[in-house]
Amino acid sequence: MPHSLHTRVTDLLGCDHPILQTGMGWVATPELVAGACNAGAFGFLAAATLPPHEVEAEIEKIKTLTDRPFGVNFLMDAPGADVISEAIIRQGVRAAGYNRAPNAELIAKLKAGGVVCVPTCGAVKHAVKAEKLGADIVIVQGGEGGGHTGTVPTSLLAPAAADAVKIPVVAAGGFRDGRGLVAALAFGAEGIAMGTRFLMTRESPVPEATLQRYLDAEVTDVIVSTALDGLPQRMVNNELSQRLESAGPIRKLALAIRNALALRRETGAGIADLLRSALAMRRNQKLTNAQMILAANAPILARIAMTDGDPAHGYLPSGDGAGVIDDRPSCEALVSRIVAEAEETLKRLCP
Ligand SMILES: Cc1cc2nc3c(=O)[nH]c(=O)nc-3n(C[C@H](O)[C@H](O)[C@H](O)COP(=O)(O)O)c2cc1C
């Protein structure tokens, strides 16, 4: 491996290449995480959509599929965050990923347990705060990224974040190839994190019918909508997003209540837990009461597409990259292609 692809991120995470697979709800399963890690990248298990007491068994499953280090991504303000943190420490997991509402106490506990802390932020000021709270690496996700997203493009956010913090920055949002990796390094980042690109691999559990929507999407089919939960979300436009955009408040409320009850069944959280989590979310993200009620929509509607395989009625979180990705390689083929292209690009730029 040439020296230029070896960064502080590969050192801290113990992976071969500065390429991270992010924690995507219902998608970043043990098989995908192990696929990414065995290919020399670094994968995060998506724990936010798992019942907290089942996370440890999923960690153990990853260990049967790979000897490489990996991470677990979860929500620090959700019920069971303490249970997940304890499992991470007990199992010697290399890294913890988190985003909204960093919890100083949990971060201190994870660090004391030797866990590398890797939050994701969408703004420079949040990256600065994350560093102060003890982050070891910060992922900054630009507006091109899938799921909850901001408005600052990756090409502006990554260099600004790299200037603002001392810890290594990983750029996310729209990455898919080796040229993108070199561009991120040029921005001052020390790696890339990819969601959508890993969703479209052989090891991804996404059912064929749903995956086809991603393969068919053009860049203009990937839209940002606030109709799902009041916050901007980037997704592949489909029947659901169109219906939600035109739905009246009563229909939206009925859907939100149904999904809140479904989330309660899925995660085993009690009503009081959900309320506490929703209130914390409102405090941390300055949400209105209406947005708070809608919070369960995204995970439940994503499950309909990602697990049940119904892309017309489910939510299709996606980065802009889906518009230009038209294949489904194995993780191994993908990662080696990215690394080879990055090396060629570096040679072309610095012969
Ligand atoms: C299908 C999908 C599901 C996602 N689920 C989550 C999630 O549960 N929690 C989270 O923090 N981010 C989630 N994200 C955001 C990703 O972790 C990541 O930050 C983003 O996909 C990066 O942008 P890219 O898709 O352009 O690579 C999701 C993204 C996608 C595409």
Image (cartoon, rainbow, N blue to C red):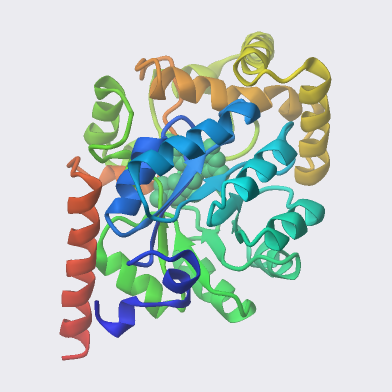
What residue is at 48 percent from the left and 42 percent from the top?
45
In this rendering, position of residue 190 left or right of residue 255: left
Q: Quadrant of the N terminus?
A: bottom left
Q: Position of residue 115 (x, y in %)?
A: 61, 59
Counting labels gives 0
* Image quadrant where residue 290 sits: top right
> Of 121 and 50, which appears nearest the observer?
50
Query: Residue 41: image x %, image y %?
Result: 34, 58
Camera-side residue of 326 and 99: 99
Placement of 340 over or under 257, stated as above or below: below
| Residue 326 to residue 274: above or below | below
Q: Quadrant of residue 73?
A: top right
Q: Is residue 12 left or right of residue 15?
A: right
Q: Nearer the viewer, residue 99 or 248?
A: 99
- Is 292 situated left or right of 66 in this image? right
Question: Can you see residue 223?
Answer: no
**What residue is rendered at 55% in x and 56% in y?**
95
Q: Is residue 56 above or below residue 92?
A: above
Q: Quadrant of the C terminus?
A: bottom left
Q: Is residue 278 visible?
A: yes
Say whether residue 241 is left or right of residue 238: right
Residue at point 35%, 52% (across, down): 37
Percent x, y of residue 255: 62, 12
Residue at position x 20%, y 60% in the image: 336
Residue 239's x, y, as percent?
Answer: 40, 18
